């Protein structure tokens, strides 16, 4: 199953009330942590487990300048251990990317969200 076919919105997880049995994701049975349901659950973890909202500071906030580069999606490269070129956008699909933001010299040059991830974020992963 590829990224487009496993898009949580397309699959209709947890839609309707009550959701149909084949669209229910649960922490009790562990289905919330199995692919492709995982693509939904990481963005809705508050619905599965107790969490606490930690508000961002209202003081000393840094606002990034934005200078989006519309050509980034068309960049091509050859992935490691491969011989076939792919575009940046194809690589995001191949890696099931739900969201990405690129900063260059203090400016946001690329920002996209897919699936259940929204601009205000549902998960923060720092590498």
Image (spheres, rainbow, N blue to C red):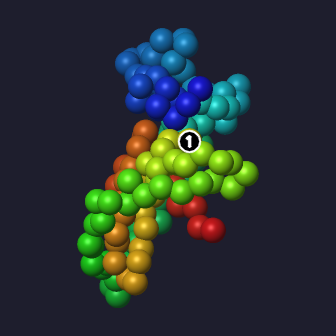
Which of 71 and 104 lies nearest the eye of the viewer? 71
Quick one: which residue is furthest to the top in this view? 21
x and y, in percent, of residue 125 in the image: 58, 61
> Toward which corner of the image does residue 22 lie, by quadrant?
top right
Quick one: which residue is furthest to the bottom in this view? 60
Give the residue drawn at x 64%, y 32%.
35
x and y, in percent, of residue 76 in the image: 48, 55
Give the residue drawn at x 39%, y 17%.
17
Q: Is residue 111 above or below residue 62?
A: above
Residue that numbered label 1 is attached to: 94
x and y, in percent, of residue 80 in the image: 69, 55
Give the residue drawn at x 47%, y 31%.
4
Residue 37 seen in render: no
> Toward which corner of the image does residue 41 lie, by quadrant?
top right
Which of 122 and 7 lies nearest the eye of the viewer? 7
x and y, in percent, of residue 39 in the image: 55, 38
Which of 42 and 108 lies nearest the eye of the viewer? 108
């Amino acid at each position: 199953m590829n990224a487009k076919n496993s898009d949580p919105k397309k699959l209709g997880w947890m839609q309707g009330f009550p959701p149909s049995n084949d669209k229910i994701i649960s922490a009790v049975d562990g289905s919330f942590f199995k692919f492709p349901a995982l693509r939904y659950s990481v963005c809705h973890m508050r619905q599965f487990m107790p969490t606490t909202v930690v508000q961002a500071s209202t003081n000393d906030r840094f606002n990034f300048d934005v200078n989006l580069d519309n050509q980034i999606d068309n960049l091509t490269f050859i992935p490691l251990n491969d011989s076939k070129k792919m575009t940046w956008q194809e690589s995001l699909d191949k890696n099931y990317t739900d969201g990405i933001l690129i900063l260059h010299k203090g400016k946001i040059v690329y920002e996209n969200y897919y699936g259940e991830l929204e601009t205000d974020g549902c998960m923060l992963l720092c590498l």
